[in-house]
Image (tube, rainbow, N blue to C red):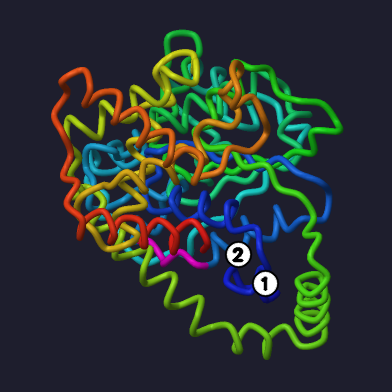
Amino acid sequence: MRAIYPFTAIVGQNRMKRALVLTAIDQRIGGVLIRGERGTAKSTAARAMAALLPKIEVFCDSPFNDDPNSPESWSDWVKEQLEVGVELVTGDRTISFIDLPVSATEDRVVGTLDIEKAIQKGERHFEPGVLAAANRGLLYIDEVNLLDDHVVDLLLDSAAMGVNIVEREGISFSHPARFILVGTMNPEEGDLRPQLLDRFALSVEIRGIRDARERVQIMERNIQFETDPEAFHTEWLERDEELADKIMKARQLVDKVSYSQRDMLSIAALTASLNVDGHRADLVILKTARAHAAFEGRQKITDLDIALAAELALPHRIKHGPFHQAEVSAEQLYDRISELQGEGEAEGDPKPDSSKEGGEQASEKKKQQINK
């Protein structure tokens, strides 16, 4: 099998890498849209992230990667097998990386029901599609802006609901469809409609690195990888394994991460002050902040978690005011949150802990995290 370029060997593009890591920690956040120039490691990062993730336990014969430990999510196929007394064998399977072609049709994505067989033989036969193969894996869409809008809608709906239901002529079939959705695009070739942009939870704008030393690093590492992929993979294996272990621990911790009324008020005040339409951004920021806290090994979110989450959740949603730009830095957002909290305190909202020691620690942590 061809070696995959190591995730930790990718030079720069920290925002993109953070977005992928946080979505891998909690798939409920939603999809990641990576917009940028050609040749900026978009597809390389997506493939490398999939390779980082651990094997999953499945029913070996299931084409839907059903989780034996989650009966509530089982596909109709598993339920039918159990009803007729079939003993299903379990085993481990590598996380799937599914590359969706731009020419994909609705039937290719959601799967098809064989109506003729149902009418003639009374049997329900379902031909799995892309969503079946992608369940519990990573679904990658290159040039997502060139994909049919209706197909993009279907993918985003499935990513949000976690299930794919196909209905034809009174016959239906359902199976789980939980996956890490990563879309990439070059804005020079056209943009997505605003409605579809908003459906992507996180968005990152990336450009080619301008620092000469980092560009030299990119060349050196790519030549090393092309010359001897296995040796290069081995060289970076320990760092990739450390990150993979950190992601696994964060997955186990994320549901235990708490948040306060003050945290939710901070998020709501931030999105309202930036004239963000709707409420999807608020939910995305909260989920992403929890994932970041879990990644850092904490069980409570902070203003810094909120700022780093907002940095990924807001760029494609801001349309008005002084923040109308492709990039909004975490430092700007952190300062904005502090400013809004100060206004809230003046109006009588609960006052946060502002002890000197706590303030110094938060400030130092902010600098360290933003500069990562």
Rendering quarter of residue 237: bottom right
Disc 2 designates what residue? 48
Instruction: Locate residue 271, reporting x and y percent.
Output: 42, 23
Which residue occupies the foreground of this view, 13 or 2?
13
Q: Kindly identify the residue that appears in the image at 64 percent across and 17 percent down.
A: 194
Q: Is residue 152 above or below residue 221?
A: above
Which residue occupies the foreground of this view, 120 or 169?
169
Instruction: Locate residue 60, reporting x and y percent.
Output: 39, 59
Q: Earlier in the sequence, mark 1 or mark 2?
A: 1
Q: Kindly identify the residue that appears in the image at 82 percent across and 86 percent down.
A: 227
Q: Is residue 85 above or below residue 294?
A: above
| Region of the chain picked out in magenta, as a range | 52-56
- State whether residue 123 appears in this view: no
Q: Is residue 170 magenta?
A: no
Count of number-bearing discs: 2
- State whether residue 87 appears in this view: yes
Instruction: Locate residue 206, reporting x and y percent.
Output: 71, 47
Examine the residues drawn in magenta and state their main secondary structure: loop
Please report contact status of discs 1 and 2: CB closer than 8 Å, yes or no: yes
Tell me the kind of residue under disc 1: Tyr
Q: Secondary structure at mark 1?
A: loop
Distance (Cα) linking label 1 and label 2 = 6 Å
Q: Kindly identify the residue that appears in the image at 21 percent across and 26 percent down.
A: 345
Left or right of residue 341: residue 110: right
Disc 1 designates what residue? 5
Tell me the kind of residue under disc 2: Ala
